[in-house]
Every structure is written in C-alpha cells, then in structure tokens.
Image: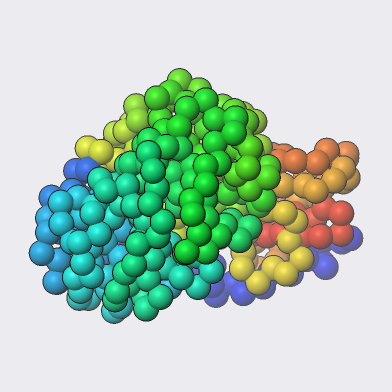
Amino acid sequence: MTARSFRIIALSSLLLPVTDLIAQWQSVGVAGSAYGIEAHNGALFAGNLGLPIQRSTDHGDTWTDANTGITVTSNWWLSSAQGILFCGTQFGAAFRSTDDGATWENIGLLGAARGFIEHNDTLYACQWYSGGVDFSTDGGATWQDTDTLIGANGLWPMISVNGDLLVGGQTGGVRRITRSTDAWTSSNSGLVNTEVYSFTRVGDILFAGLGSGGGVYRSDDFGTTWTASGLDGNIVYALHAMDTLLFAGTANAGVHMSSDSGATWTAFNTGLNDLEVARLTSDGVYLYAGTLGGGVNRYGISTGLDGSRERPVGVSAFPVPCATTFTTVVQLSGVGEVTAQLVSVTGQVVAEQRVLPMSAGARTLTWDVTTLAPGVYICRVVAGGRQGMVRVVVQR
C-alpha cells in the first residue's frame, strides 16, 4: 500500500486544546483529598472532601463551583449513570443532578454512598458504613434495598459484567447478583484476601484491586475465579482502563500502568504531586488521578479515534502531548505484520514502521519525533487487514 492511499478523517474533531504539560502529570485545581472525580457530559467534576464540588469544561485548566443544593461538605464520591450525576457524602445524604451539576437534589440518606452504576436498566448505589446496596427504577428518586450482604462492609466498587452486578467490600470480598431481587453470592475463589477496593475491565478480562497488600487480581471468567496479576505488596484503591492501557492507583506508590493486561507493570508517576491515589478516571483526552492530599492531577493520553469501524482490538498512545518521543500500544489478536504510519494533518506520511512478525497481545512501538514540527498528527496502525488510528500532539 502506498503513502497516497492513506487519508485522514474527521480532523475537525481532533484539534483539541493542549497544555504546557510535556510527558508528566500536572496538578489541576485546588489541593486536598479528591475522592470524587468524574467525567460527565463533556465536563470534569471534582469533589475534594470538605470543599465544594467544582466543574471544569477545559480539562481542569479552570474551575467553577457546582454545589448549588449540596448541604453536606463531606462529599467523597461522584458517579455518572443513566445520564445523571450523583454525589455520595461521607456523613449525610446523597444527591443527584439532572442538569449537569447546575443544581443538586437530595435523594435520601443512603449510608455514605460510595458508588452508583446502571445494571440491566436499573440504578444501584452501594454504601460504605451500612454495607448495603440499594436499587432504583426511577433514576434515583426512590430507593429499595437489595438482599442483605451478610459479612460485607465498606462497599466501594461496582461493575456490571456479563449480565451480573459485582460489588466489592473492605470486608467480604466480591459478591454478585443478576437481578435486584436475587440473593448475593460470594465470588472470591483465588483471591489472596477479601478486601476489594476497585474493579475495571479490558475487553473480557476483569480486574480487581485489593487491600492489605494484595495488589491486582484478574479474572478470565467474569469474576468466577481470580489469579494474581501483579503489584503485590500494594493496596490498590483505583483501577481504570483506557482502551488496552490498564492503570492502578495505589495507597503509597502512586499510579502504575500495564499495557499487557496486567502481566507487567511500570510506575507512572513523573510529576504526580501525591502518591496516595484514591480515584482514576478519563475523558478521552486526559487520564485523571484523585489524590488524598494533592487534589486532581492529569496526564495526556490518546486512545483509538471514534468512527474507525475496522479497529484492531485497541490502539493507544502516550504521552500526549509529547516533545521528543511517544509510544504506541497495539493490541493484536494474532501473529502477523504490523504497519504503522505517522501522518500529518495534510495527509503526508512523515514516519513509518513495519514489523514482521508480531505475536498476539499488547505490543509497543516507540517513535522519535524530535525532527517533526509541533502540531497534530495521526498514528495509523494496520494489522491483519484491520486498522486503528490515534491522535498524537507534538508540542515544545
């Protein structure tokens, strides 16, 4: 295939604002304990414990208060579900906003709500102190109890996977139901302990972050059984996936990244102003870390472009922006030749790599961009007749 056959699509959606950050974390907003950060309807929301909830529409460059109607200062969780923004507080009621944070409505004492999620068209909320899970069929206006979770307290993470809802607790480990009326059953086979703080998934692989130094565990059968997946010795408060990139936020070792589904991990902390990370989220342009002392930090990362219908399993790039080098991560489903091209906004191929063969799994390509002019580029990857594209910004 010649260079002329490569074309750039939807460039207008790629010209996103960038910052002065080059290849490191950057603090955005006020310092404090940022338990709650959430990307919702094109904005970023942050709730430092004891401070007002704030909203940013420029990826954290500037913030405005979005606290009207909140009557409790102990906000410690933010979730977006069913198009609604929810706030859980440590010592009072929970709140919801149906107008993107402009105003908030008290939705009742949910016992320190620590998470909200949609599962099978039903909204669920889990609670830290009471160890219960409630459900709502009217967007959170009214709530009912699910079955009692015996021996479970400190509920934090929830995830909907393969038709089941899983909840993790500081005690009791992983529990699961299919419907709101079901009895909860344990799903802890293989876990080194039953202190579970976080969930995420990469494709069909489910990950859990454990307390008491348990590190990360993975499940290839949707939580039925678990195996160790690294970071042992660490408390893992947060897990987050961006395409094929997996990130873990720890209690005292900052953020770690894996590009091979948890087989290996690399510290990802340059510029991070606090190594106690309670929350990770992303908005498609940045990865955000909520720290317990340093507030919110961000790191620029691009993942596969929307609209690319024939994508490989995944393609990502970091750091974005970059100054001298960046890395492309490609998830391959089989062995074969990989062609990767870096293309300017005018359609010119400015760099190319061809690798034969590459085996299945997450594979990385490193690019030297020291000779390229600053600007927006597209990294296009072709493998096995399928393709993926990711935006890259060179900035100096």
Give the tally of numbered discs. Answer: 0
**Residue 181 rendering spot, x and y as whole percentages:** 47, 64
Looking at the image, the residue that sits furthest to the top is 233
Q: Is residue 363 visible?
A: yes
The answer to whether 98 appears left or right of 183 in the picture is left
Q: Is residue 16 visible?
A: no
Depth check, front residue: 104 or 133:
133
The answer to whether 161 appears left or right of 360 in the picture is left
Depth check, front residue: 296 or 20:
296
Depth check, front residue: 65 or 153:
153
> Taking 368 as reference, is 19 above or below it?
below
The answer to whether 253 appears left or right of 381 in the picture is left
**Residue 24 rendering spot, x and y as whole percentages:** 41, 39
Q: Residue at x 75, y 56 (%)?
A: 312
**Residue 217 rendering spot, x and y as whole percentages:** 56, 33
Colour pattern: rainbow
Q: Residue at x 32, y 47 (%)?
A: 131
Q: Residue at x 47, y 27 (%)?
A: 193
The answer to whether 272 appears left or right of 15 in the picture is left
**Residue 307 rendering spot, x and y as whole percentages:** 65, 72
Image quadrant holding the N terminus, namely bottom right
> Taking 170 as reference, is 306 above or below it?
below
Q: Residue at x 29, y 76 (%)?
A: 141
